[in-house]
Image (tube, rainbow, N blue to C red):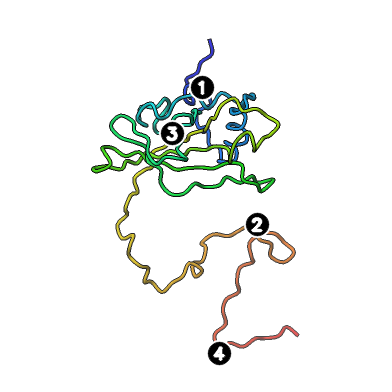
Amino acid sequence: MEKLQNFVAINGGIKLPVGYRFCPTDEELVIHYLKRKVFAEPLPGSVISDFDVFHTVPWNLPGDSKERRYFFSNRKGHVCGNISKVAIGSGYWKSIGKEKQIVSSESRQVIGMRKTLIFSKGKCSNETRTRWFMHELRLAGSAATFYPFQMPAADFAVYRVFQKKKKLKTKGSNEKLTSSWKVEDIKPSFIDFTVKYGDDIGPPPPCSPCLSEGSEIISSN
């Protein structure tokens, strides 16, 4: 039986070697995963699972809560692009900011949109914002008009759920640098053997003793 102690599971799906992370860009998520999911095409790998992210609070979602988690979910019933809040248990997801365009690096066309949401506890009148965030990535416009020769299977979106880390305040972080020296003034205390000196490669020859003002230069001629 194969030993898997040196492998980690991603959202209960594919197992990757320890140290590897699933870190796709927005463009990669839209082109290689979301588009294929919407049109029922084969996916590059079983990395993103199907799960209704609006079914439970973010910390109870499948997978390692310390890592970024990715899910496919049908937008039908809770289209975040048209509403500002989705209630879940003791809190709700609230959209913040404006949608961001996802542009193809090759065609320079807008291929998708990304909306950012934050999870808040309590009610609207007495809410407490958490450090849980979520990105909703969807195809730009209507999938049927964006890909006219393909029939979409469902109105899927891909969701990226993560928790922002607390910023550590360092002592004296607000103090201004008042020293007169500059970074450029710092001289290295090592010899760079990759620098070419004249016709030879290596360190420069040792310097000759300095002459005082009263010293005479004697010619050998």
Q: Could you tell me which residue is drawn at 37 percent across and 43 percent down? A: 165
| Badge 3 density bin: few <14, some 14–19, many ≥20, Cα 10 Å | some
Q: Which of 205 and 190 is in front in this view?
A: 190
Which residue has dot 2 on it? Answer: 194
- In front of the other: label 4 or label 3? 3
- In front of the other: label 2 or label 1? 1
Q: Which amino acid does label 2 sit on?
A: Thr
Q: Which amino acid does label 3 sit on?
A: Glu
Q: What residue type is labelled 4?
A: Gly
Residue 115 position in % (x across, y down): 47, 42
Residue 31 position in % (x across, y down): 62, 36
* Mark 2–mark 3 CB contact (< 8 Å): no
Sequence-first disc among 1 and 4: 1
Q: Which mark is residue 27?
A: none
Which residue has dot 4 on it? Answer: 214
Q: Which mark is residue 13?
A: 1
| Badge 4 density bin: few <14, some 14–19, many ≥20, Cα 10 Å | few
Dot 4 falls on a residue whose secondary structure is loop
Sequence-first disc among 2 and 4: 2
Sequence-first disc among 4 and 3: 3
Dot 3 falls on a residue whose secondary structure is loop
Residue farthest left in this picture = 126
Measured Cα–Cα span from mark 2 to mark 1: 48 Å
| Badge 2 density bin: few <14, some 14–19, many ≥20, Cα 10 Å | few
Residue 146 position in % (x across, y down): 64, 38
User: Does 179 sit left or right of 23 as displayed?
Assistant: left
